[in-house]
Image: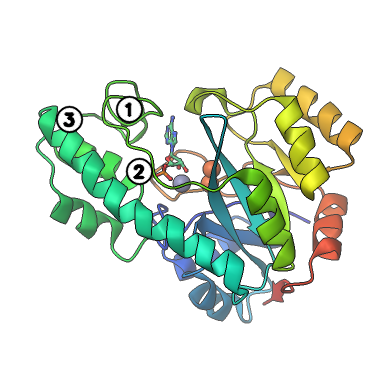
């Protein structure tokens, strides 16, 4: 079984449509793929339609933007009821604020001499939940930086960078409770991704575990070997399962779908904890 539990479509900042993502997952030889767009479930219906007859299983999910002690972090949520009102309202709040903040970042970039504009970012984002990677693509188009990843520096869009503007992000303990109340399973995404900025302490992870966190994403391209070993030990201590995932974003990142995968036993635990929705078997 090849299981990849973290992938983005163009419903957020990936470059594949949900149907293209499903086709790419089949081509990559995956048995299970999770669609986890930032703060939105807008890609679920198209992906569910696309898995029909493929033999691929789709795990509907999302990746919620959170913030604690001045540190941004991401919470993956799987198999929640997308209609549950409180969690749906929180996703809506984050998505709406992404527009205000996107415009503010573009304004900052212009002040700093980058010839980009909001219409360009809107064209790049399309219907997607707008984020810094779309603005990074605009900076690439304008010839300001060579690659999307080169835009994530202190000079431009990195956390705390010259053109970084904060968006509304949920307190993670609240987020864990919202996901559970919607019947979903919360998993801390790339908890040790130091290249993105400061990461949270083990004490915060223990607090999240006490609030109902289900697992830690351990095998991820942004984690080195010692970080993975540490996180595996911490997960065992706290009674959490561990996952491995690509965090695929199409051509906006270099990681390939299925480059990191999740152990079937951990996947069984995840599915066993969910009451909000079931995996969709194609
Ligand atoms: P946003 O959700 O708008 O705050 O943007 C965060 C997204 O930017 C993350 O989900 C990543 O996809 C991307 N990102 C963050 N840091 C980096 C980085 N150092 N290199 C490339 N992409 C990054
Ligand atoms: Zn992303
Ligand atoms: Fe993330
Ligand atoms: Fe992600």
- Residue 175 visible in the displayed image: yes
Mark 3, Cα crowd under 10 Å, few <14 / some 14-19 / many 20+, is: some
Between the residue at mark 2 and the residue at mark 3, the CA separation in whole angstroms equals 14 Å
Q: Residue at x 30, y 33 (%)?
A: 147
Note whether 14 is above or below 152 in the view shown.
Answer: below
Q: Which residue matches tag 3? A: 144
Note whether 99 is above or below 173 in the view shown.
Answer: below
**Rendering colour mode:** rainbow
Q: Residue at x 56, y 53 (%)?
A: 63
Secondary structure at numbered mark 3: loop
To which quarter of the image does residue 80 belong? bottom right
Q: Which residue matches tag 2? A: 133
Quadrant housing the N terminus: bottom right
Label 2 or label 3, whichever comes before in sequence order: 2
Does mark 2's beta carbon lie closer than 8 Å to ligand 1? yes
Label 1 or label 2, whichever comes before in sequence order: 2
To which quarter of the image does residue 279 belong? bottom right
Picture coordinates of residue 46, whole percent (x, y) = 49, 76
Label 1 or label 3, whichever comes before in sequence order: 3
Picture coordinates of residue 31, whole percent (x, y) = 71, 62
Picture coordinates of residue 241, whole percent (x, y) = 83, 45
Disc ID at residue 150: 1
Mark 1, Cα crowd under 10 Å, few <14 / some 14-19 / many 20+, is: some
To which quarter of the image does residue 226 belong? top right
Between the residue at mark 1 and the residue at mark 3, the CA separation in whole angstroms equals 9 Å
**Label 1 with label 2: CB-CB less than 8 Å:** no
Residue extending farthest top: 226
Secondary structure at numbered mark 2: helix
Viewer-proximal residue, 197 or 35? 197
Q: Residue at x 78, y 23 (%)?
A: 230
Q: Residue at x 54, y 72 (%)?
A: 44
Between the residue at mark 1 and the residue at mark 2, the CA separation in whole angstroms equals 11 Å
């Amino acid at each position: 079984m090849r299981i990849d539990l973290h992938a983005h479509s163009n419903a957020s900042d990936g470059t594949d449509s949900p149907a293209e993502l499903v086709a790419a997952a089949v081509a990559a030889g995956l048995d299970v793929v999770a669609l986890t767009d930032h703060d939105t479930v807008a890609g679920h219906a198209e992906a569910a339609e696309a898995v029909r007859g493929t033999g691929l299983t789709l795990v509907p999910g999302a990746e919620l933007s959170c913030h604690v002690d001045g540190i941004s972090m991401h919470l993956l949520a799987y198999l929640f009821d997308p209609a549950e009102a409180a969690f749906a309202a929180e996703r809506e709040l984050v998505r709406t604020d992404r527009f205000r903040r996107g415009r503010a970042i573009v304004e900052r970039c212009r002040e700093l001499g980058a010839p980009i504009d909001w219409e360009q970012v809107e064209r790049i984002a399309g219907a997607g939940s707008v984020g810094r990677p779309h603005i990074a693509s605009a900076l690439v188009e304008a010839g300001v930086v060579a690659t999307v990843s080169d835009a994530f520096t202190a000079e431009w869009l990195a956390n705390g960078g010259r053109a970084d503007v904060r968006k509304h992000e949920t307190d993670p303990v609240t987020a864990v409770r919202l996901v559970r109340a919607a019947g979903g399973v919360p998993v801390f995404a790339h908890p040790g991704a130091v290249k993105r900025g400061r990461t949270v302490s083990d004490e915060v992870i223990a607090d999240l575990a006490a609030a109902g966190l289900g697992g830690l994403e351990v095998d991820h391209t942004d984690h080195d070997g010692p970080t993975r070993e540490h996180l595996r030990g911490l997960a065992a201590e706290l009674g959490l399962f561990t996952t491995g995932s690509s965090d695929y974003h199409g051509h906006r990142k270099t990681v390939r779908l299925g480059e990191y995968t999740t152990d079937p036993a951990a996947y069984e635990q995840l599915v066993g904890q969910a009451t909000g929705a079931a995996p969709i078997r194609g």
